[in-house]
DNA sequence: CTGAAAGCGCTTACAG
DNA sequence: CTGAAAGCGCTTACAG
């Protein structure tokens, strides 16, 4: 493959370029058996007492040919794919972005190949994606923020795939979630303190975003209520808006609310940075907020928001600890479907 | 599997629960051959003239057992995986988030299964990830914003995998990129106009972020220079800072710059929203900007920034058009390694 | 120290 | 209308 006189690789001489090299090709070139090639390539050759010379020769040939083992075939034979799947709702905020990025890193560190797919909070897509991942033989499937985690756990169970939940808990597989109650309690206290110091001091807080059927939303609402109770502030139930997470929905919901009221809430609790987007638009458009800016606290840390506007309070979910807990569960024997709750943070990373 | 008297599914009676069902299991249950099951399941059964009754029976059995075909085996046999891989630098901004989300959607619409992996702008990780994807038999690999796209194209070539580049161009595979020159030209003009109207009016703009070796950075710099030339404003070369994209690096670079100067630049051109984070921190910390806020323009649209601060000008890269172009190239016969350049946008989505 | 052979779960040309 | 058989590229117990 290399010009003897110049030492340069000759164009077009790479063996069977385009056609994939197999261990049979390598075996023929090395004058050895496919078994030998296989064991050299997967590191079991010392055990098989193959000569170092042969191992060396095979390794060199593999390098020269950019040989890439066929994992489909390998996994089929070993009956283990080393694939780990993750379903994630969206890639549109820093929380899920960090989850995905760190998940990939930790999976690779454990010798697993991560497969991630985004299901846009669509229950049908979630099931479809789970099926696809199972078909692709993932050894384990993580459902992150899934609408119906138990449906996914069932699918996994009938295919012998290990299932786990992240961010939103299920009853059929172990779950790792944030302490949404605790985070909301602290956040609400801070918003109340912040708005109390404003002029004129604010009353109860408006709650915007999330789905009332979500575990995380109901837990955050519970923390929200308890913080109000502590402070002796009554909550008007019309002040809880849960139209989902999408910014357009939050925008509309808040716009409607403001249109029906004469004085604007002095403080707002927002369930996600995506929801925050819609809230900010509604505030900007409303006459009620002319010149004013309410106290705002939201779930999920966004570094750009922090850099731009120090007035907005943010709860940071502890992604590294969540993923650590997830992989710890994975290390351990397949346990019962308990829930691990990770405390939230409040300062900068 | 169902209790005859109650009609309810009995716990633990799902057939060989945990052990995956194969087409052989289904064949035995249906009283047919594995071949028949296979063709019913992959839709070729009309062609094989299998009876509708048998097809129906097999389909029902497959449903009952949550049968998921083993794609590894199927792909191995067909010598086609229908897997499409994408390498992406980071998940930490809306630009790449949108790319990934839309890529997944378009891939699925074409019957392909997307595999995405994030390589954190690390050249070694990029190559390692590309190898892994090739091993997993992707039919096609998209390198997005890769440091060395040609290295990846080479790896693909020697395994007969189709390669394409996105966001950053290469010379060995077709590339789809943004018109970084045009976008920077327009953005610079707008920043100049914005800062000219401020009091006191600003001079030349400070350029912050990117890698000077990046095609996109050099193109943006070219647009930046041309816009200055048009306006008859000379550029001081010390005003071009290209320490990379990471916010910490931009933060440090700008901090250093400000420490060495007596008056702060009235306007800043920022190469990405991540870089913007660092720029904002440096501005906040500097005495030179006390009370003032420079005119800022940046690449990449971030909806939260838009909602929070209307002063910041943003160029939006046209992700839908970029991906459309990418999939069009994919549809077409494997063409020559040309570059498709997509104009940038300037308004809200 | 090494190879021949069986088998992972599919698909498909071939032969009824 | 349907099945037996070969083979995709690996791995590994088994037999030298």
Image (cartoon, coloured by chain):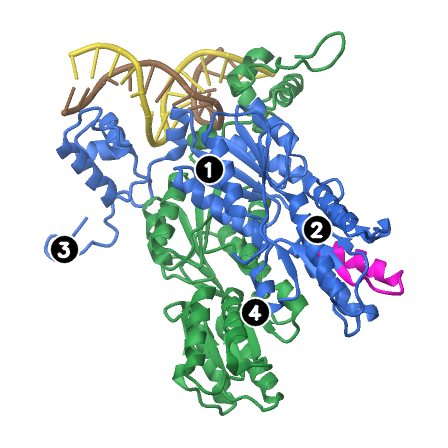
Chain colours: A blue, B green, C brown, D yellow
The residue wearing badge 4 is B344
Residue at mark 2 to residue at mark 4: CA–CA distance: 29 Å
Q: Which residue is mark 2?
A: A245
Q: Which disc is residue A7 wearing?
A: 3
Give the residue number, with chain letter if any, for mark 1: B81
Q: Position of residue A113 (x, y in %)?
A: 43, 39
Residues flagged by tags 2 and 1 on a common chain: no
Residue positioned 55% across, 11% down in the render:
B28
Of circles 2 and 1, which is in front? 2
Task: Tell me where residue A68 sits by quadrant.
Answer: top left
Based on the picture, tell me whether residue A253 belongs to the magenta stretch.
yes
> Is the residue marked by circle 2 packed among few (<14), some (14-19), or many (20+) residues within 10 Å?
many
Q: Secondary structure at mark 3?
A: loop
Viewer-side label of 4, 3: 4
Tell me what residue is drawn at x 62 percent, y 19 percent: B58
Q: Tell me where the magenta segment starts and ends, as one range.
A: A247-267
Q: Badge 2 sits on which subunit?
A: A
């Amino acid at each position: 493959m290399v010009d003897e006189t110049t030492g340069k690789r000759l164009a077009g001489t790479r063996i069977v370029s385009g056609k994939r090299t197999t261990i049979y090709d390598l075996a023929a070139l090395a004058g050895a058996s496919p078994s030998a090639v296989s064991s050299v390539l997967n590191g079991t050759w010392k055990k098989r007492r193959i000569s170092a010379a042969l191992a060396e020769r095979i390794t060199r040939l593999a390098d020269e040919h950019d040989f890439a083992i066929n994992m489909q075939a390998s996994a089929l034979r070993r009956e283990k794919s080393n694939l780990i799947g993750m379903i994630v709702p969206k890639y549109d905020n820093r929380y899920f972005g960090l989850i995905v990025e760190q998940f990939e890193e930790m999976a690779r560190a454990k010798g697993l190949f991560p497969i991630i797919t985004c299901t846009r909070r669509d229950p049908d897509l979630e099931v479809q994606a789970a099926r696809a991942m199972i078909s692709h033989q993932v050894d384990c499937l993580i459902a992150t923020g899934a609408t119906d985690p138990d449906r996914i756990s069932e699918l996994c169970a009938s295919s012998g795939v290990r299932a786990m939940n992240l961010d939103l808990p299920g009853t059929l597989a172990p779950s790792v979630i944030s302490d949404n109650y605790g985070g909301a309690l602290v956040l609400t206290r801070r918003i109340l303190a912040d708005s109390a110091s404003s002029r004129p001091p604010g009353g109860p807080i408006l709650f915007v975003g999330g789905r009332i059927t979500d575990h995380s939303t109901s837990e955050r609402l519970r923390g929200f209520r308890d913080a109000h109770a502590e402070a002796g502030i009554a909550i008007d139930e019309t002040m809880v808006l849960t139209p989902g997470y999408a910014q357009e929905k939050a925008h509309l919901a808040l716009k409607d609310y403001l249109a029906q009221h004469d004085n604007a809430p002095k403080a707002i609790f927002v369930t996600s940075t995506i929801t925050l987007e819609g809230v900010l638009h509604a505030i900007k458009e409303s006459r009620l907020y002319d010149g004013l800016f309410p106290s705002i606290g939201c779930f999920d840390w966004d570094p750009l928001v922090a850099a731009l506007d120090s007035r907005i309070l943010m709860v940071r979910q502890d992604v590294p600890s969540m993923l650590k807990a997830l992989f710890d569960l994975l290390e351990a024997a397949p346990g019962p479907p308990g829930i691990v709750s990770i405390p939230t943070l409040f300062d900068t990373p």
